[in-house]
Image (cartoon, rainbow, N blue to C red):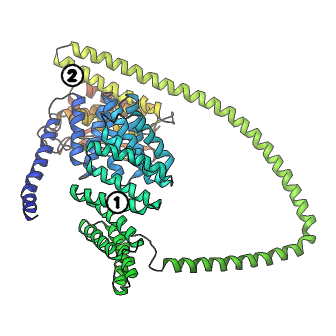
Amino acid sequence: MKLIALFLLLISPLLALAQTSRLDSLKAELSKNHPDSERSKVFNNLFLELAFKDNENAFAYLDSAILLAERNNDSRAMGRYYNNKGVVSLRSGQLRRAMNFLLEGVNHAEANQDSSTLLKLYGNMAHIFMIREEQEQAEKYYDKILLYCNPETEPIIYLKTLNNKGLLLKREEQYEKALEWFAKAKMMAENQRDSAELANVLNNIGITQYHMADRKKAERNYREAIKINKKVGHQYQLVTNYLNLGNLLLEDELITEAKQTASLALKLAQSEKYLEETSSSQELLYRVNKAEGNLKEALAYLEAYKESLDEFNQEKYSKDVASMEAEFDSEQKSQEILRLRQNEDFQHALLEKQQVQITLVTVILVFLVIILLVSYYLYRVKEKANAVLETKNQKIETLIRELHHRVKNNLQIVNSLLNLQYNRVTDEGTKQAIREGQSRLEAMSLIHKNLYMDEDFTGLDIKAYLDFLTQSLAVSYGFPVDAVKSDIDLENPIFNLDQAVPLGLIVNELASNAFKHAFENKELAQLMVEIKEEKQKISFKLKDNGKGFSEELNPLNESSFGLKLVTTLIEQLDSELVSKGKEGSEFSFEFVRK
C-alpha cells in the first residue's frame, strides 16, 4: 500500500501537467482556420476536459459548440452536446434543468435517428424519473431502451436497463417479476464478465429475497456481492452490502457476526467520507449493542448517530421512535375526541336556532340560486364571444408567424446563393465582401427567426437578440462566448422592428470590425455592449479592450461600405455616431425610443 501511495504521489504532478498540456493544445486549435464543424468538436472536447472540475467554464465552451453546430445545421452533434449538458446538471442535483437539456437532446437525436445518443438520453431521463419516484415515466423510457437497444453493440446500456427494470418492480413490491429481470441482468453480467455490475445485481437480488422472507438466499447473495466488490474495489457498493448483511444477521439474532459486519461498514464509510452510510452504520451498531445488552456502547453509538444526522442535515427518529409514535398517536386521538365533542356542542347549538332561522335561510338560498343562474348565463355568453375572438387571433398569429418564417427562409436562400458565389470567386476582396454581406443577412434572419419562435409578434427582445448575435460573432472569429459581455438595462427590452433592425445591423458591423481588427496580439479579448434607458432615451455604447486608434486614423473618416452603412443606419435612428480610440475603441450614440 505504501508503494502504491508513493507511486500516486509521484505521478499526480505528471497527470496535472498532462491535463494542462491537453487544454493548451485544444485552445491552440481554436486559432487555426478550421471549418465550423471541426471548431464545434474542439469546443466540446474542451468542455469534456473541464466537466465536473470547472463547470462554469465547461458550460461556456459547450455553449460555443452548440452555437457552431446550430449555425452549421449539425443537429446530430447538438443531440450529443445537450446530453452532455444534461449529465452535468443531473450530477449537480439540478433535476429540472437537466430534464430540459435532455428533452432538447431527444428532439435532435430523434430527428437524426441517432440511436446511440438516444439510448443514453432515455437512460438519463429515466434516472431522473426514478429519483422523483415517478415509476410509470421511468418504466416507459426503460422499455424504449430495451426495444431499440441492441445488446450486442450496446451491452452495458442493455445490462443496466435490465437491472433498473428489476428495481422498478421491486419498488412496486412485485418481487417475483423483479427477480425475473434481475436473473436476466445477472446472466448478461456473467457473460460480459462485468464484475462491478454483477455485484450490484446480486445485492438487488438479495434485497428482493429479503423482502420475500427468503433469508438464506438473501444472505448468500449479499456475501457473494461483498466478495466481488472487495476484488473490484467498489467501496460504496461494499458499504451497502455490509449494511444489508448486518441488518439481516441482527434480525436472525447472530449478534457477534452482525457486530463485526456493522463495524466493517462503519470503518469503510468513515474512510470514504460517506456521511449517510456512516450514520446508517452507527444506527445499526446502536441496535446491535442494545440487543447484546451493552448499553454503554449502545448509547455512544446513538450519540454518534445523532451527530452524523445533524451533519447530514436530515431528520430521523431517535432510539425511542416506537414509543414516541405511540405517544403521538395517543395525543392525536385525544385531540380528535376533544374536537368531536366541541363539534357536537356546536351542532347542538345550531339545531336549537334552526327553527328560527329556517325561513330566512330559504329566502337567501333562493336569491343566491337566481344570482348564480344569471351569472352562469352571462358567463356562457362571454365565453362564446371569447372563443370566437380567440379563433380569429389564432388565425392572425398563424399568418404572421408564417410570414416571418418565410422571410427567414428567403434570407437563408439568399445566404446560400451568396455562399455558392463565394466558392466560385477567387479574388480575396470579393470573398471578403460576400462574407460581410452574409453576416448582415444572418443578423436580419435572426430577427425573423426570433419573431417566428416568440409568442409576441409586435416587437423583438433586443437583449436576448444582441446576446446571441454577439456571442455567435465571437465564435465565428475564433473567440469563446465569454469574450462578449453585455450590460443592458432597459425598462422594457422589447423594441419595435423599425428600431430593432437597424440597431442589430449596427452591432453586427461594429462587433465584426472589432473581432477582425481590434485584438491583434491581445491575449484576453473583451467586447462590451452597453444599453441604458432613461425616460424613453436610449444610450448605446460598444467598446473593446483592443489596440484602439488615433484621431488621424479615426475609422469614421474612412470610406468603407461597412462604416457608411453604420452611419446611414444611425441616421435612421435620428442620431449621430461618436468614436473614441485611446484605450481601446469605443463607439456610442443616443436615440429616442418609439
* Residue 139 in the image, given as x and y percentages of width and height: 47, 44
Question: In x, y percent, where is residue 253?
Answer: 40, 75
Residue at figure coordinates x 69%, y 32% from the top left: 388
Quadrant of the rendered structure where residue 325 is? bottom right
Q: Is residue 55 above or below residue 35?
A: below
Asked if one can make out residue 489 in the rendered structure from this viewpoint, the answer is: no
Q: Amino acid at mark 1?
A: Arg
Q: Is residue 535 left or right of residue 565?
A: right
Residues at circles 1 and 2 in contact by the CB criterion of under 8 Å: no
Assess disc 2: are there few (<14), some (14-19) or many (≥20) residues with their C-alpha within 10 Å of its C-alpha. few
> Please, is residue 418 above or below residue 52 in the view?
above
- Give the SS element for disc 2: helix
Quarter where residue 3 is shown: bottom left
Considering only order in the chain, which callout, 2 or 1, is on the residue closer to the N terminus? Answer: 1
| Whether residue 367 is visible | yes
Nearer to me, 71 or 180:
180
Q: Position of residue 24 (x, y in %)?
A: 12, 43
User: Which residue is the extreme one toward the front?
Assistant: 216
The alpha-carbon separation of the residues under discs 1 and 2 comes to 74 Å
Residue located farthest toward the bottom when viewing the structure as drawn: 296
Front residue (pair 520, 153):
153
The disc label shown at residue 432, or none: 2
Look at label 2 and name its amino acid. Answer: Gln
Residue at the spot 66% in from the left edge and 80% down from the top edge: 334
Tell me what residue is drawn at x 33 percent, y 31 percent: 76
Residue 523 or residue 124, whichever sits in front: 124
Q: Secondary structure at mark 1?
A: helix
